[in-house]
Amino acid sequence: MKSLIVYYSRNGNARFVAETIAAEIGADVEEVVDLKKRSGLLGFLIGGKDARQGKETKISPTTKMPTDYELVIFGTPVWAGKPTPAINTYLKKNNLSGTKVAAYFTKSQKKSQAIKEAKMLVPNSTWVGELLVINPLKNKEKTEKQIIEWCKTITVN
């Protein structure tokens, strides 16, 4: 199945997960780049506020067309219980209707509203799974095993 992974990563966690999934299923990868400064404590606080409000942001142009893929997996950190503004923007700009969609979320806590919020951003798509990864860079070996098992569930036709 031709697959695309689209992700936003502020500190490398979502990037690590994207690269691990791509290696496992042979997917293409596209990073979503937020043009708003999100570094440091102030960037973190503003990012959380923007996410909580469901805001969009300016992103760099992307090069891969999600309509060229059978499966689109998007990945995002969870900010204030929600997907990041960069992923909100990407999903609102790209119609994934009729596409199989999966998502992964990186965070430092267990419970999250982000899955529910993300599903609302991809109406008329076929949701095939979600993965919540807690602190992926802190335990890479455990994370890799978790990802490998999850990939088996989303690549079944």
Image (cartoon, rainbow, N blue to C red):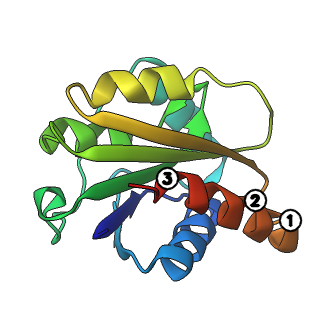
Label 3 and label 1: CA atoms lie apart by 19 Å
| Amino acid found under the numbered disc labelled 1 | Lys
Residue 143 x/y as whole percent: 78, 63
Total numbered badges shown on the rendered structure: 3
Residue closest to the far front: 157
| Amino acid found under the numbered disc labelled 3 | Ile
Residue 142 badge: 1
Q: Disc 3 vs disc 2: which is toward the camera?
A: 3
Cβ atoms at labels 1 and 2 below 8 Å apart? yes
Residue at x 61% of width, y 24% of height: 81
Residue 146 badge: 2
Label 3 and label 2: CA atoms lie apart by 13 Å
Callout 3 secondary element: helix
In the image, residue 59 above or below residue 101: below
111 left or right of 157 in image: right
Name the foreground residue: 111 vs 61: 111
